[in-house]
Image (cartoon, helix red, strand yellow):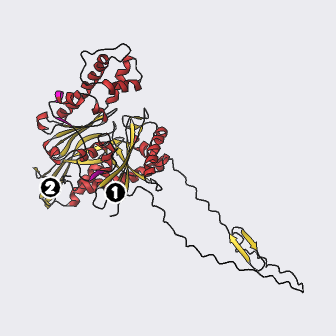
Amino acid sequence: MEEKIIIALEIGSSKIKGATGAVGPDGAINVKAVEREPISDIVRYGCVRNIVETAQAVRKVIDRLELRESPRKIEGIYLSIGGRSLSSQAATIERRLASDTIITQEILEDIFSEALDYPLADRHVITVTRRELYVNNALTPKPLGEIGSHILAKLNIISCRNQPLRNLTMMVEDRLQLKVLDTFVRPLAIADLVLVEEEKRLGCMLVDFGAETTTVAIYKNGVLVHLVVLPMGSRNITRDITALNFIEEQAEEMKKAGGSAFATLEANHTPGQPDFVAINNYVSARAAEIIVNVCEQVKYAGLTPEQLSEGIIIVGKGARLSGFNQRLSQISGMKVRTGVPVSRRLRILDGRIQVADAVDVLAILNAAAKNNPQECLSTPAPVVETPVRPVAEAKPVVTVADPTPGPARVPAASVASPMNASQPAAATTTTNDTTTTTTTTTYTPPVQHIDNSRGGNRSRLSALYDKMRERVANAISNSFNEEDDEE
């Protein structure tokens, strides 16, 4: 396999990130560039609200990435799906066979196909993840080849609302004229990047602390058992500080400069300077609310902190709040570490890339590289070398006067015919003995019409859904057959 350049795009509530990676023949990915563009109030809770302004911000990121690959242009991208629209619910699917039968790949694929078609109002199933599978009431991690007459599959059905997905495709394909090659669930992609298999088996909780949402994914026995998106994030802390007569930009700077998840009991306050005792009263109160809601998810998953022996792995820029990880560990009673890429397949080529702040977009690159990656850049134009013709040496011209003048030589006129009547006009140059005809044709490119109708958008969504189904069918049906390789 030749090296392929892939592009990942992550649209968050506070910034848009894009990344370029080169996937080699061995499947390893070299990250070449990561670009960011801050945004405000055009994406809310991870869902695009203002398509025009979001498209403008995305175009800035795409243009910066294209500069690194000039003269090639970006034609396709991989997108992440997350935010408040994302949800997960448990589903159980049964198969009763006429008699004891060898469980085949077709039987398993039929189970997952039914899960992908699970009826949900105004929602679309993005992916399906396994939890448990029983054959004749016995837990069977690898059912392929087993003999049984009754199969019970417990699965996670992960979906999102239709409107946010339509907004994404409309913005990318209609406004930016880019092709969405595939989409990936952000928390699942991050988990594959920052968690090792041992942590998933022993039990852990992945927390993505973002600007307006906090996503919690809990793993036990190697599988996802709980996924939820909380509608609260670091921006809630910033907006609380505005109650002290700061505008939001100033409040954000105050939070970064001296904000703490622990209340400040006393501090030397200089007149005219921010009062961090008052500020941290707001910061610590909101941080505690977020932490308590995160910890409650362990109970909702039917587990206890003792059953999640690998603790909490936290990502997201919100986790950089001073003292947040320490207070999270204090309230939850679990150890906490910052999530960083653990895969040996991913290599950072640019030392300026801040890996901890780019985990989300790097996770999409990593997921795309694992799922039959497609080239995202235009094909470079072939270089044609024009041979240089030797210039003939000029010879002296000798003119001999004709003593007997004769009639002047007149070049033959071209005769128009019906066959050449529609051809472009020819420029004719006449010399003493030679007539040279040069034909110049003007090329008019075809007009491309953008289909903005709901029907056109629906057909593009159908193609994207088919791509999702193909990927899920290939990946999920095999997840019961063999353990995931530890990166």
Residue closest to the eye, 120 or 130: 130
Reading the image, the residue beneath label 2 is: 142
Instruction: Tell me which corner region of the image, top left, top right, bottom left or bottom right, holds residue 387.
Output: bottom right
In the displayed structure, 25 sits above or below 192; it is: below
Q: Which residue is located at x 82 percent, y 79 percent? A: 410
Quadrant of the drawing holding the N terminus: bottom left
Q: Position of residue 194 (x, y in %)?
A: 23, 44
Inspect the magenta stretch and tell me whether residue 339 lies in it: yes
Circle 2: residue type: Lys
Residue visible at 35% across and 25% down? 238
Which residues, given as a range, are shown in magenta?
Answer: 330-348
Label 2 crowding class (10 Å Cα cut-off): few <14, some 14-19, many 20+? some
What residue occupies the far bottom of the structure in this picture?
Answer: 404
- Read off the residue under disc 1: 373
| Spot occupied by residue 360 in the image (x, y as percentages of width and height) | 31, 43
Q: Position of residue 219 (x, y in %)?
A: 18, 42
Side of 227 relative to 145 (left or right): right
Q: Is residue 171 left or right of residue 446?
A: left
In the displayed structure, would residue 409 be above or below residue 203?
Answer: below
SS label for mark 1:
loop
Task: Please check the rendered image and state whether residue 198 is part of the magenta-colored stretch, yes or no.
Answer: no
Please indicate, yes or no, whether residue 159 appears anywhere in the rendered image: no
Q: Nearer the viewer, mark 1 or mark 2?
A: 1
Q: Is residue 173 visible?
A: yes
Q: Report helix, strand or loop for mark 2.
A: loop
